[in-house]
Image (cartoon, rainbow, N blue to C red):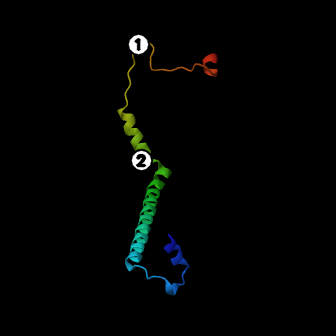
Amino acid sequence: MVDAVWGRLLPIGRRQPRDPGRQSHWLLLRVVTLQRWAAALTACFLLGWGLAPEIRTSYLQSRLLSRWAADMKFTLQAGPSEEIRFPKSGPYDERL
């Protein structure tokens, strides 16, 4: 640790030369980081570009919901349903 601190305090002419491979490694990391940011920004842009028409028109929502509703079925059976839950307190249980 003393060598690292002392190396920073020495004038530039007396410092030991750096490894050239280390500098290219740093450059490679920088390029990879920039590519990751570019990919993330591109993905966000494409997602926004695809969602913009959906927000205006709700085309996909209407198509999906109509298909799901077409498959829904129900039947009537005699007697009260055990699936219904009524409120135990509040204005509707007292008034209605």
Q: Quadrant of the C terminus?
A: top right
Point out residue 6 in the picture as x, y percentages from the top left corner: 53, 76
Tag of residue 23: none
Residue on which disc 2 sits = 60
Indicate whether 71 appears above or below 7: above
Point out residue 17 in the picture as x, y percentages from the top left corner: 43, 82
| Residue 96 is at least partly visible in this image | no
Point out residue 16 in the picture as x, y percentages from the top left corner: 45, 82
Amino acid beneath label 1: Ala
Point out residue 4 in the picture as x, y percentages from the top left corner: 50, 73
| Residue 31 is at least partly visible in this image | yes
Residue on which disc 1 sits = 78
Q: Earlier in the sequence, mark 2 or mark 1?
A: 2
Viewer-nearest residue: 62 or 27: 27
Viewer-nearest residue: 65 or 16: 16
Please tell me which residue is depicted at 40% across the width and 39% down the height of the picture.
Answer: 66
Viewer-nearest residue: 33 or 13: 13
